[in-house]
Every structure is written in structure tokens, then in C-alpha cells.
Image: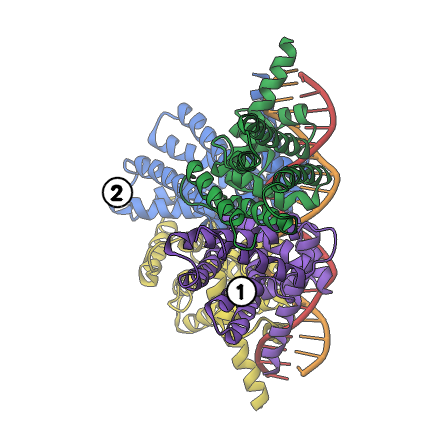
Chain colours: A green, B purple, C blue, D yellow, E red, F orange
DNA sequence: GATGAATGAGGTTTCATTCAT
DNA sequence: TATGAATGAAACCTCATTCAT
């Protein structure tokens, strides 16, 4: 157990270092040595723990997906109506733990590189499908059938767009503002005349 | 004149090759040799014309921004009302000339790498500002003041999100469908009860 | 200590290889691969230890300056008169350890390239100033004031000229002959009627 | 004849440009393009006239040797005694036409690279032999037989050393001072007690 | 004569990865 | 477990040279 513990601690240290290093240097440019330096360790150690650079990147992405999943689950439990559950998904995406520049930056890097990595694209696909299903499930009772997909795409793409833009932000992000802004968009979409 | 012509022709050839090669291999991974092969030329020639890899990438991004600008201008001229002009901006972003997988892919690559390149980030910023201004100008007469920014962000981020997703599409894109879907989203946002 | 030792050993090995390789191929033409081959290693290793080609060249020049310095110090300790100390400086420049074709050759290469490298020119300047000061100090009590600079320049430039010519020698150098020849020149200069 | 004339003019232009460019950038680093730019022409033209880079370098060295030869001949004609003829050789080496930083610089570059080029080393050897023979011829009647070689080496190496140092000079050269300094050195050597 | 255009050859440097300690 | 040491592979870029115009 102690052994297991050390492994986990080192894992986490490296993943944190990866988030920072990738954010600062870019996925395609960051080197093992830079990440190792950020972690106060050596490149050889990273390979010892993760097997390869791609292994480290996959672990880092998994780490972030885990945070998103947790944030979603936690907010889900407290939601009592379809509308609240829909908002929970939105809020989770702009959670304080998640909606930071380094993480948005990293997210964008992963997105951009997913098409060229089987392992990354698989994670990306799974995550997107989960969000999609959540949205669909809740929207079914919030808007007429003919609008479900339109609203869903509007919301899901909106979220992606916000992350993308956030990654380039010159100033620190404001998760609270992001959440209320997202809710406002959702309100507009759900209360349309067309419905 | 003949000399000048050759330069332009080669420029275009290399830019076309870059779009394809970057799409296929990824911005951070694609090599000069691969692009050169795609263009049926040599890596040395690319440096002869563009000075460096980054020079080529910047030229390629400029090329794409030019296409977007043209598409927007053309549709603008035919629009006669604020609503139509708003739709013109949307449509331009999903123009047949622009909304293809390789180009969406490239777009995403540039986005992801802009933060690490002065030249790319400048182009990115300028483009985004132009779209923003267009949206704001038209929305002023379409929704109440308090909603302008919300609707603008909803639309602009939506477009970004669509491009992002399109880049990962396993099947060929359908620009016509993308345009009508975008219009549907716009309709929802413009016709909301809240307004 | 063992680790520290390895670094030092490798350093020395590479420096030795550099002397030979530069002598054989020329400073401006010799490649990292050639030097590496001479050292029985890889070009990547050289960069690992010296950072760059220029770093290696600087280290090599430092190495030679160190030998010259040591030779001078050693002979200095045994000298008991100004005349002997003057001869010590001359002898040091033609020391058995130093006055070999590869080293003269390298010396000339460094001279020729010093003007184009901040790091090399600095070393070159420092070394020349040291020799100059030594000469001046001893000549003060050997020739009338009005001749100090003339004799000093005659000797210092003579030494440079000998090295230069030695670098092109088709046959192995004879340090003993070089030393006695230098002493003969010094004798002529010091015993002139003009004094 | 007109044709011949154009060729000669272009030749000279390129040689002048080479002297400047090599001085500024270094023999081993200067490129055909840089020399061409200095000459206001194209690299292709240089190859048209000189066949190759080495051909250009050889022509440039020949040009400088020619100047030296002329300077020597001219001063020789006016000399009426062995001593004057000896001084004529010295003076010629520090002639106003010759003793400039770019030319000393170039000279050093050629020296350093002669061992790696058959064509350059041949020129170098011939020139050095000519100076040597001149010195020997005159010294025969100026110093005892046993000292001829010592004085000759002292003078010839002194001259080389001065050129070498001059190449690195941070301030413009003073040919007049150089000539009188050289004469002073010669005086010391010729008037030694030992003789 | 003159020069853009084009490129093969080759150099330096970087880097992920392996291995011995 | 940890990391210096070492390197093959490969990328970018430069450059002398050739050739068509």
C-alpha cells in the first residue's frame, strides 16, 4: 500500500507538471526534459512511470477527464429537475477546479492533437459522447423534439468555443462569470419563441 | 511579369500542400519534407520562398483568412437587412470554399499553436476581432442591448465549436447543412422570450 | 565523485579529439561528426557535454591556454634573473607539450576565427595581454626604456610568426631547436649596439 | 578587347567584394550570396566568372600577392644598397596599399586555410619562398654567415606576427608607424654585439 | 552576360528513449 | 527508485552549384 501510494504521488506530481509545462510551451514543442524540470525530476523517471511521452500525455488527459466527471457527478446529485441537471452539466464544464487557463490550454492542445493519436482520440470521443448523452437526456423534456439536436449542438459547441477562447485569454479566468454567462445562453435557447 | 507570376504560383502551390499536409500529420509533427513531397518539390525550395517553416505557416494562415474575408464580403454585398447581414457572417464561416475537413483541421492547429507564436497569435486576434465587430454591429438592431454580448458570444463560440468538431469528423462535411443548422441556432437566440 | 570524474574524463577526451580533428580538417570545415568519430563517440554526446560546437571550441582553446600557462609558471619558478625569466616565457611558448603541429595548427585556426566569435576573441585577448605584461616586466631591466616596446614587439610577433609557420610545416617540429633559435633571436635583440 | 575588358572589370569587382566580405564574415563562414550582395551581383555570376568558390578565393589571393609583388618591385628599384633593399622588402610588406585591416584579415584567413587547399597552399608557399630569398640575398652582405638564418627568421616571422595582430586591431592601421617600427627592429638585429 | 529558380548534400542541434549504476 | 550518460533518428536550415530563361 505504501508502494502503491508512492507511485500515485509521483504520478500526480508528473501530471501536474505536465499541465503546466504543456500550457507554457505547447503540446508539440514541450520536451520530456522540460516537464521533468517542472516536476523537479528527470526525464528518465517519467519513462519509468509512464513508459513513454504519449503514456504521460494520456495519463494527463485521463486526469482532467476525471476531474470533469467528478464535477459533473457532484452537481448532478444536487439537481432535482431536468433544467437543473442541464445546468449542472454546463456548470461542471466551468467548474472552479477546471476552468483555469492552463487547463483550457491543455484541453485545446489535446483536442488539436487527438486526431493524430489513437489513445487521445479515443478519450476525446468517449468524453464528448458522455456530454452529448447528458444533454440529450435532459433536453428531451425541455424542448420540442425537433429542436433537441439544435439546442444540444448550440450548447455543446458553445462550451467548446468558450474553452478554446479561454485558452488564449490574456487575463485570469472568472469561472463564476463563465457559468452565469453559459446559463444566460441556455436560457435564451430554451425560451425561444420557436418552441 | 513572368518572374512575378512564377513566385505567386509556387506560393499558392506550397500553401495548398501545407493545408493538406498539416491536416494529415498535425502542425507540430508535419515536416518540411512531407509538405515538400505533397507539393512535388523540395524542402529547400520552401525555405527559398518562405524563409522558414514558420514563414510558410504564417503565409498559409493568411491565405485562409483571405478566403474567409472574401466569403464574408461577397455575402455581405447581397444582404439587405441586419438579420441578413448577420446570417451572411454565419454563412461565410461555413462557406463551401472554407468548410472542409482539411481547412477546419488546419484552423484548429493554428488556434492551438497561436499562443506560442507571435505571428500566428496576431493573425488570430485580428480575425477574431473582425468577426466580433460584425456581430456586434448587426445585433445592435436585432436584440435588446442587455443581450447583445450574450448572443454574440453564443454565436461566435458556437461557430468555433463547430469548426473544432468538424476537424475531427470521420465523414466529409456538409456545408449546406452546417449553414442551415447555424441559422437555426441563430433563430433560437434571436427569438427568445427573454428578449 | 565517480560521476564528476566521468564528466572530466569525457571532457578531456573530446578536447583531445577536437585538437586532432581541427588540425586535420580545419576549424571552419571540421564537423561534429568527425570530431565525434575521432573521440569514438557520437555528435550528440558532444552537445550533451559542451552544449554546442562553439562551446566545444571554447573549451578546447581554454585547455590549450591552460597548458601554456602551466608551462610558463613552471619555467618561471626556476628562473632567477630577469633574463632567465624572459627566456622562460620564450621557452614556454615552444614547450614540448605545446609546440606540436596539431596544436600550432589549432592555435592558428583559433586566431583566424577569434574576430568572429566573442568567446574566442576574449580568450585570445587575455592571453596576449598576459604574455605582453610578462615581457614588459622583464625587459624593463634588460634594455633602455626607449627600446622596451620595440624589443617586446619583435619577440612577441616573432613567436606568433613561428607558430604560424609551424602550423604549415611538412615535417615534425623540433621544440628544442625552436627554443634555441628563439634564444638566439632574443640575444641579438638584447645585445644590440643601439642599446 | 572590349570583351576582355569587361571580364577584367567584373573580376576586379568581385575580388574587391571578396576582400571585404571575407574580412567581415570570415573565410569559413562567408557565403557566395554575401559576396555577391557586396558586389551588387548574384552568386550565379560569380560561378560564371570564377567557376567555383575556391576559384574566387584563389583569384583573390593572387590579386593580393600581385599587389605585394608590385610594392616590392617598386621599392626595390629605388634601393641602392643591400641595407636599403632589405628595408625595401620590409616596407613593401607594410605598404599603404597593403597594410589595411581587411587585407591583413584576409591574409590571415588565407594562411589559416591554406593547409586545406592545394591551390591556396601553393600560392602561400611560393610567396614565402620569394620573401625568404630576398632576405637571404641581402643579409649575406649585412651579417656574418652564422647569423643569416637567425636574422632572416626573426624578420620574416616578425612580419607575419605583425600582420596577424593587425588583423585583430580594433583601430585603423598606421602603415607609416608600422614601417618605422619594422626598421627599428631590423636595426636592432643588424647592429647586435654578437655580430 | 546575368540571374531567379531549384535542389542535393550535408551540418548542427534536439530529443525521446535506453541502460548502467 | 532514480538519474547521469549515451545515442540513433530525424528536423530544420544553409549553401554551393546547376540550369533555363
The vertical placement of B107 against D37, above or below, is: above
State the image coordinates of residue A165 (x, y, percent, origin top left). 50, 47
Quadrant in the picture for the N terminus of chain B:
bottom right
Q: SS at mark 2?
A: loop
- Relative to A183, C193 lies left or right: left
Q: Nearer the viewer, mark 2 or mark 1?
A: 1
What residue do we see at 26% from left, 42% from top? C144
Q: Residue D184's image quarter? A: bottom left
Q: Chain of mark 2?
A: C
Q: Chain of mark 1?
A: B
State the image coordinates of residue D120 (x, y, percent, origin top left). 60, 61
Label 1 sits on residue = B87
Label 2 sits on residue = C144
- Same chain? Circles 2 and 1: no
Outermost residue toward the top in this view: A2
Are the residues tagged 2 and 1 within 8 Å (C-beta)? no
Amino acid at each position: 500500500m505504501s508502494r502503491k501510494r508512492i507511485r500515485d504521488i509521483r504520478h500526480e506530481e508528473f501530471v501536474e507538471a505536465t499541465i503546466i509545462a504543456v500550457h507554457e510551451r505547447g503540446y508539440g514543442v514541450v520536451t520530456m526534459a522540460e516537464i521533468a524540470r517542472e516536476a523537479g525530476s528527470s526525464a528518465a523517471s517519467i519513462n519509468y512511470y509512464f513508459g513513454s511521452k504519449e503514456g504521460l500525455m494520456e495519463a494527463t488527459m485521463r486526469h482532467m477527464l476525471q476531474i470533469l466527471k467528478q464535477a459533473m457527478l457532484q452537481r448532478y446529485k444536487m439537481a432535482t429537475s431536468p433544467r437543473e441537471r442541464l445546468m449542472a452539466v454546463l456548470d461542471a464544464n466551468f467548474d472552479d477546479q477546471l476552468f483555469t487557463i492552463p487547463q483550457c490550454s491543455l484541453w485545446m492542445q489535446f483536442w488539436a492533437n487527438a486526431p493524430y493519436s489513437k489513445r487521445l482520440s479515443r478519450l476525446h470521443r468517449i468524453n464528448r459522447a458522455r456530454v452529448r448523452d447528458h444533454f440529450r437526456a435532459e433536453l428531451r423534456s425541455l424542448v420540442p423534439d425537433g429542436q433537441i439536436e439544435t439546442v444540444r449542438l448550440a450548447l455543446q459547441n458553445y462550451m467548446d468555443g468558450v474553452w478554446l477562447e479561454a485558452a488564449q485569454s490574456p487575463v485570469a479566468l472568472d469561472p463564476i462569470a463563465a457559468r452565469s454567462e453559459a446559463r444566460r445562453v441556455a436560457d435564451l435557447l430554451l425560451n425561444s419563441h420557436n418552441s
